[in-house]
Image: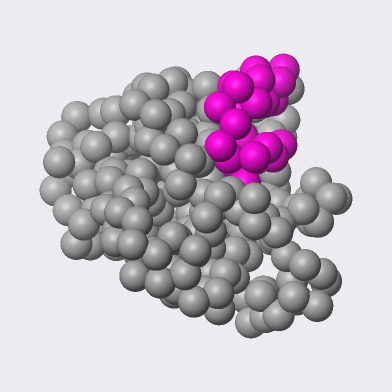
């Protein structure tokens, strides 16, 4: 397991990313026609790195979870290990900032790879499949977690996102709605560093984020240009609603996933 050696290294690693707007929100299914509905039990986010020798087993676990239709498993490669000898080709400083924001919200300041965050609420080592499953069940004991139905339709070149009303009524829950583009499988040959010479595959890699809007607890709809989430290599999409804000992410309230190709 790769950890920062001290506060100074942590601050250096995250320098310049405090302006990130990346709290996750909703992951809604995206389809080329009709309406997609999903009722997943969990959003599992893996913070991983091509430069971390402890990460490949966790990357494999995410690949296994990605085949479970009741789980939305996402890979978020971080960039703070790039100085170790291999620059992660999928890394994004916004992923590093999101991981840090989660640690602040939990109050433990625990930032490492491979780290999994389950339903925005708890963290475990990403290679421990049993602990991930237990954490999924534990987080679901909270009433609002993954309780909000989300859907998306395609109309021409527009994406229509719909979020149902909170089961607790208006004002009972609120959060942010986000849509992200995903690459289902990305093979990488690592040239240097701890994983030198290894051929690794990363699953459900987040490639872009777009905030759809703020959700107040009432039923709501948004329209997004399809071109805003399309790019080379993207073959899936996720929409999710998350409690809190972009800087203070909380529990996942609802989500959906679909393939595009």
Q: Is residue 38 above or below residue 17?
A: above
Write down the quadrant of residue 34 in the picture: top left
The C terminus, quarter of image: top left
Please tell me which residue is depicted at 47% across the width and 69% down the height of the picture. Answer: 193
Is residue 260 or residue 129 the one in the foreground? Answer: 129
Residue 21 can be seen, yes or no: no
Residue 36 placed where, x, y %? 29, 28
218 with respect to 164 (left or right): right
Question: As displayed, is residue 119 above or below residue 10?
Answer: above
Q: Nearer the viewer, residue 238 or 10?
A: 10
Residue 242 location in percent, x, y? 60, 42
Instruction: Name the residue: 65% across, 57% down.
Output: 2
Residue at 38%, 35% (x, y): give it.
63
At horizontal 62% and vertical 35% (from top left) the residue drawn is 118
Q: Is residue 140 magenta?
A: yes
Question: Is 212 situated above or below 96?
Answer: above
Q: Nearer the viewer, residue 213 or 45?
A: 45
Colour scheme in the image?
A: one colour
Say left or right for 187 vs 112.
left
Q: Quadrant of residue 138?
A: top right
Residue 225 in the image: x percent, y percent? 27, 58
Left or right: where 98 falls relative to 164: right
Asked if residue 131 can be seen in this view, the reply is yes
Check the image and report above or below for 120 versus 82. above
- The reply to whether the magenta stretch includes residue 9 is no
Q: How many marks?
A: 0
x and y, in percent, of residue 53 in the image: 52, 55
Instruction: Give the extent of the magenta segment.
Output: 115-141
Q: 4 or 140: which is nearer to us?
A: 4
């Amino acid at each position: 397991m790769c950890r920062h050696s001290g506060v100074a290294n942590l601050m250096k690693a995250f320098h310049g990313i405090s302006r990130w707007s990346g709290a996750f929100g909703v992951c809604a299914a995206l389809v080329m026609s009709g309406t997609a509905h999903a009722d997943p039990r969990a959003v599992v986010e893996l913070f991983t790195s091509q430069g971390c020798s402890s990460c490949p087993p966790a990357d494999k676990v995410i690949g296994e979870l990605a085949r479970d239709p009741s789980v939305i498993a996402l890979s978020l490669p971080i960039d703070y290990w790039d100085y170790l000898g291999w620059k992660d080709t999928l890394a994004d400083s916004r992923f590093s900032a999101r991981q840090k924001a989660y640690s602040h919200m939990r109050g433990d300041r625990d930032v490492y790879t491979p780290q999994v965050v389950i339903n925005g609420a708890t963290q475990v080592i990403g290679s421990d499949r049993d602990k991930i499953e237990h954490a999924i069940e534990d987080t679901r004991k909270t009433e609002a977690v993954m309780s909000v139905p989300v859907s998306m339709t395609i109309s021409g070149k527009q994406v229509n996102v719909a979020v149902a009303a909170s089961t607790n009524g208006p004002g009972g829950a609120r959060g942010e709605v986000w849509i992200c583009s995903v690459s289902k499988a990305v093979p990488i040959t690592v040239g240097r560093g701890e994983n030198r010479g290894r051929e690794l595959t990363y699953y459900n890699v987040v490639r872009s984020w777009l905030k759809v809007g703020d959700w107040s607890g009432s039923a709501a709809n948004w329209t997004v240009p399809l071109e805003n989430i399309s790019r080379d290599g993207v073959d899936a999409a996720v929409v999710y609603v998350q409690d809190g804000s972009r800087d203070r992410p909380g529990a996942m309230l609802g989500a959906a996933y679909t393939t595009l190709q």
